[in-house]
């Protein structure tokens, strides 16, 4: 049974999971006009059971707030600090003393990201990047923390050229003077290669070559999968192809035992007019499928069963980000901690999944065909055995007297009675699950906390009740339909939904 989840990025398969097990983490950006206080951020992380986070700096307030939570933390050295650290061992040692030693082990710091996408965004700092990594590592060694805290530097996937087929991939050779010593360092220190993968941009820049479903992890028939002409291996998504391209690119330089961690990936939920595929539905699809893919240890075609731990970009929508609208809309939550959308996770291991209120509702989908809504409403109030008496004239939920409002009440009542499973809020595609309480006035919906903060109970009719127990099936558009047609229609919808 598929369980619909109001955000649950959950982390490792369990809190006590072994380090080698794959996990999902989340990046925490701070480009918000109203940035929540660190204690609020941590409260959200704990409520959502998020056990792995990546910070873009080493903010003292965040590190203090994360102390004694058990949350595993990646901290970062911002690019603007690289030149100083990469040219001075003592500067690196001071940074480690101030930002790591002062907080560890109360704050469970597990890795240091030295810069971010340095080769592609700050190439003038590239010559000192590996030195900075080595100096930071030396400071950890001096503090006896090198086994607990790994050092790496997130790379943009664009440094990999000719990424498909993956077996032909190689790093941009102009960066070999940096990449070879970096890979030597990662191998000798037991650190992972950190990679940022954005199938959204790969899809947008492909001019139609990459199908949307291939970017979104949607199931493809074997004939539509991408095939590596050298290995004859099939690829069903961009993410796996890029991870395998990274393995092959490292192997091309004779490095075969460095693990990969994806430090950024995601999908925007809103975009400009020229970004039609930056939608809530696609963002939900990508991140839901990604979480399943990682937690289920699917692995990649090159390394099946060896999943790549991944950090979703990102926790909050960042309204101060420059650029197109999509840049501001990668978040899973808004600044108030309300989910942007409800993740749909299936077979995702022992993931705890709630929003902060644990309240979801089933409503009529905006823009749905009124005739489809009417038929679904008829079914819910008939064979669906929903008590639709509150929708009768003079009753609390009669107003507004339209099919959308009445269908929403019937859908939500059925959804709650069936245990809030996603299958119970489909109605042949005319219903959606939301975190917004549709209650209004004196019409209090099932599952609502109501005006006095108490849960509204659902009285389910007995399963042996007949259609005559319902107050009438066709609340709208009934004029002109013979009763026999109504019965036939309800029987047809019964076959569809049951």
Image (spheres, rainbow, N blue to C red):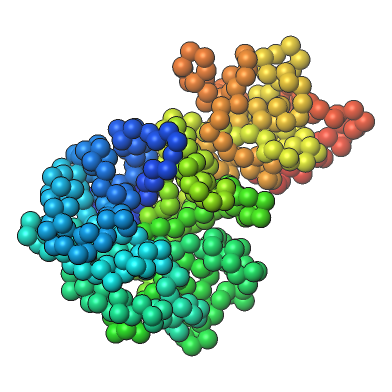
Q: Is residue 460 visible?
A: no
Query: From the viewer's perspective, is residue 100 above or below residue 402?
Result: below
When asked about the image quadrant of residue 23, the answer is bottom left
Query: From the viewer's perspective, is residue 353 above or below residue 169?
Result: above
Identity of the residue furthest to the right in this view? 480
Q: Is residue 63 visible?
A: yes
Pinpoint residue 226: horizontal percent, then vertical percent.
56, 76
Pinpoint residue 184: horizontal percent, then vertical percent.
23, 77
**Front-most of residues 339 and 102:** 102
How many numbered circles are shown?
0
Pinpoint residue 482: horizontal percent, then vertical percent.
90, 32
Name the residue at 53% across, 33% down.
435
Name the residue at 26% across, 52% down.
75
**Front-most of residues 458 and 284:** 284
Pinpoint residue 113: horizontal percent, then vertical percent.
28, 58
Position of residue 13 in the picture relative to residue 170 (left or right): left
Position of residue 163 in the picture relative to residue 151 (left or right): right
When asked about the image quadrant of residue 247, the answer is bottom left
Q: Which quadrant does the C terminus fall into?
A: top right
When asked about the image quadrant of residue 80, the answer is bottom left
Name the residue at 79% across, 37% down.
370
Query: From the viewer's perspective, is residue 398 above or below residue 421?
Result: above
Identity of the residue furthest to the bottom in this view? 230
Name the residue at 59% across, 63% down.
204
């Amino acid at each position: 049974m598929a369980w619909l989840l109001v955000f649950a990025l959950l982390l490792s398969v369990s809190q006590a999971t072994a380090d080698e097990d794959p996990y999902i983490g989340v990046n925490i950006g701070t480009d918000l006009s109203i940035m929540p206080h660190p204690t609020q951020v941590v409260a959200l992380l704990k409520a959502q059971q998020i056990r792995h986070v990546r910070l873009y700096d080493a903010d003292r307030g965040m590190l203090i707030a994360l102390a004694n939570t058990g949350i595993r933390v990646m901290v970062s050295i911002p690019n603007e600090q690289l030149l100083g650290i990469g040219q001075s061992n003592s500067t690196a040692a001071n940074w480690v003393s101030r930002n790591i030693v002062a907080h560890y082990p109360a704050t469970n710091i597990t890795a240091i990201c030295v810069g971010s996408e340095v080769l592609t965004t700050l190439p003038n700092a590239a010559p000192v990047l590996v030195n900075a990594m080595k100096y930071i590592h030396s400071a950890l060694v001096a503090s006896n923390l090198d086994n607990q805290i790994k050092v790496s530097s997130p790379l943009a996937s664009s440094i990999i050229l000719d990424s498909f087929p993956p077996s032909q991939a190689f790093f941009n050779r102009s960066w070999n003077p940096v990449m070879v010593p970096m890979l030597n360092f990662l191998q000798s220190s037991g650190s992972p290669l950190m990679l940022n993968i954005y199938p959204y941009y790969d899809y947008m820049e492909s001019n139609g070559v990459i199908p949307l479903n291939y970017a979104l992890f949607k199931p493809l028939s074997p004939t539509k999968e991408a095939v590596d002409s050298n290995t004859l291996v099939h690829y069903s998504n961009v993410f796996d192809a890029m991870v395998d391209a990274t393995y092959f690119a490292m192997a091309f330089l004779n490095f075969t035992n460095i693990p990969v961690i994806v430090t950024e990936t995601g999908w925007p939920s809103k975009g400009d007019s020229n970004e039609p595929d930056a939608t809530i539905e696609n963002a939900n699809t990508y991140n839901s499928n990604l979480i399943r893919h990682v937690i289920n240890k699917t692995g990649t075609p090159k390394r099946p069963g060896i999943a790549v731990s991944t950090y979703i970009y990102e926790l909050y929508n960042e309204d101060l980000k420059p650029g197109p609208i999509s840049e501001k809309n990668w978040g899973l939550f808004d600044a108030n901690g309300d989910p942007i959308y409800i993740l749909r996770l299936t077979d995702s291991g022992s993931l705890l999944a709630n929003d902060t209120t644990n309240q979801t509702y089933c409503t009529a989908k905006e823009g749905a065909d009124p005739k489809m809504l009417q038929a679904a409403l008829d079914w819910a109030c008939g064979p669906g055995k929903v008590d639709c008496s509150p929708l009768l004239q003079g009753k609390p939920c009669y107003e507004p007297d339209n099919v959308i409002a009445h269908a929403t009440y019937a859908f939500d009542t059925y959804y709650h009675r069936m245990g809030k499973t996603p299958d119970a809020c489909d109605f042949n595609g005319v219903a959606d699950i939301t975190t917004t309480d549709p209650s209004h006035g004196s019409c209090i919906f099932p599952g609502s906390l109501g005006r006095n903060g108490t849960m509204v109970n659902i009285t389910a009719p007995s399963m042996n009740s007949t259609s005559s127990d319902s107050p009438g099936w066709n609340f709208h558009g009934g004029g002109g339909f013979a009763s026999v047609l109504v019965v036939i229609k309800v029987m047809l919808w019964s076959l569809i939904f049951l």
